[in-house]
Image (cartoon, rainbow, N blue to C red):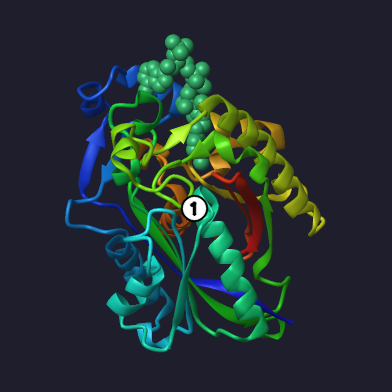
Amino acid sequence: MERTQIVGTGSYAPSRVLTNQDLERLVDTTDAWIRERTGIEERRQAAPDESTSDMAVQAARPALAMAGIQPEDLDLIVVGTVTPDMPMPSCAAFVQAKLGARRAFAFDVAAACSGSLYALSVADQFVRTGQARRALVIGAELFSRSLDWSDRNTCVLFGDGAGALVLAPVSDTDDSGPPRGILSTHLRTDGAHAEILTIPGGGSRMPMTEEVLHERLNTVHMNGREVFKFAVRALVDSTHEALAAHGLEPGQVDHVIAHQANLRILEAVLARLEIPREKCWLNLHKYGNTSSASLPISLDEALRAGRLKRGDIIVMMAIGAGMTWGSAVVRW
Ligand code: COA
């Protein structure tokens, strides 16, 4: 049987650093509050002339280089984003053009902070069926332009960035030992909880008007406490489900690659799963919540730090607006 392997990773974070101290000058907050409640120390902010597709391309190039392929070799590009360059066309179309990936068809997936996990799952299906041999999966998010910089509940949480993964097929007969690659992805959605995390204005329900702009309804609105509770429950459940599908126990997990929303969410999830914190790659102290970018950035950093060894079991998990969430199991 053919399955999909991750053969290249890359990531990009804009150079401008916004520290908690910088935010103390913008809103009524403190460095201590942000660190204690979220684990975030600083985040990155895109330059004024930088767009989501620019960041995506910066993450894609090192991923393609690691995979040893050229942009023209790509059959498919899937970008997980809810902060595209513009409502139409897709961010993926701009990425395809900027990379010069002439042969690739390209589209976006909108699943907020679960975007790269959803994009990975979609691309995995194309690769498994043989409709795409080489696929590029990107999570790219530029939330700094969709935040209300006077709302301390939200503006301290998010950062800009992008991460990329290159996928290719691997056959079980290519290898001795247990099958490697993406073993499965488990995606979930519960739209009944959509209202706890939204950008309410600027779409068809509430088109952009002066009032929408004045009320800042074109920015992120969140019930943080509800999101927190939902996230812990959902991530624990989907990870149990994903592991059980392969007869695995949490104790057999070598690495957790998780969407980085809040350190306390991750600690609560890891404690409930009884997975030691050291097994989870953590970088939200330096990037904040980069939404769909955080999962591929984390995988890229863990790989380049030499943490991932052949045969290791990796569980990925992400949660985002929708609510959307899910887990994936990968044997490296
Ligand atoms: N600085 C100082 N105080 C702040 C603050 C900030 N940046 N943001 C909120 N507060 C205040 C609140 O206004 C509230 O004050 P009040 O009691 O006077 O109303 C108080 O802190 C406590 O708020 P609460 O919501 O109980 O805090 P919390 O411990 O739940 O932490 C979050 C708030 C947002 C950090 C936390 O709920 C969270 O991380 N939720 C998940 C958010 C998330 O991950 N979203 C993305 C999902 S992909």
Residue at figure coordinates x 41%, y 38% from the top left: 220
Residue 91 position within the rendered picture, expressed as x and y whole percent measured from the top left = 37, 66
Q: Quadrant of residue 232?
A: top right
Residue at figure coordinates x 29%, y 33% from the top left: 214
Q: Residues within 10 Å of mark 1 (few under 14, many from 20)?
A: many
Closest to the observer, 162 or 64: 162
Residue 61, placed above or below residue 243: below
Residue at figure coordinates x 46%, y 57% from the top left: 296
Residue 323 position within the rendered picture, expressed as x and y whole percent measured from the top left = 60, 44
Closest to the observer, 194 or 12: 194
Q: Quadrant of residue 99?
A: bottom left
Residue 232, placed above or below residue 239: above
Residue 304 position within the rendered picture, expressed as x and y whole percent measured from the top left = 41, 59
Residue at figure coordinates x 19%, y 51% from the top left: 47
Q: Is mark 1 within 8 Å of ligand 1?
A: no
Q: Is residue 310 visible?
A: no
Q: Quadrant of the C terminus?
A: bottom right
Residue 14 position within the rendered picture, expressed as x and y whole percent measured from the top left = 25, 52
Q: Quadrant of residue 168?
A: bottom right
Q: Is residue 219 visible?
A: yes
Q: Which residue is mark 1?
A: 295
Q: Quadrant of the N terminus?
A: bottom right
Residue 307, placed above or below residue 157: below
Left or right: where 284 falls relative to 46: right
Kindly identify the amino acid type of the residue bearing the numbered disc 1: Leu
Left or right: where 308 falls relative to 91: right
User: Secondary structure beneath disc 1?
Assistant: helix
Number of marks drawn: 1
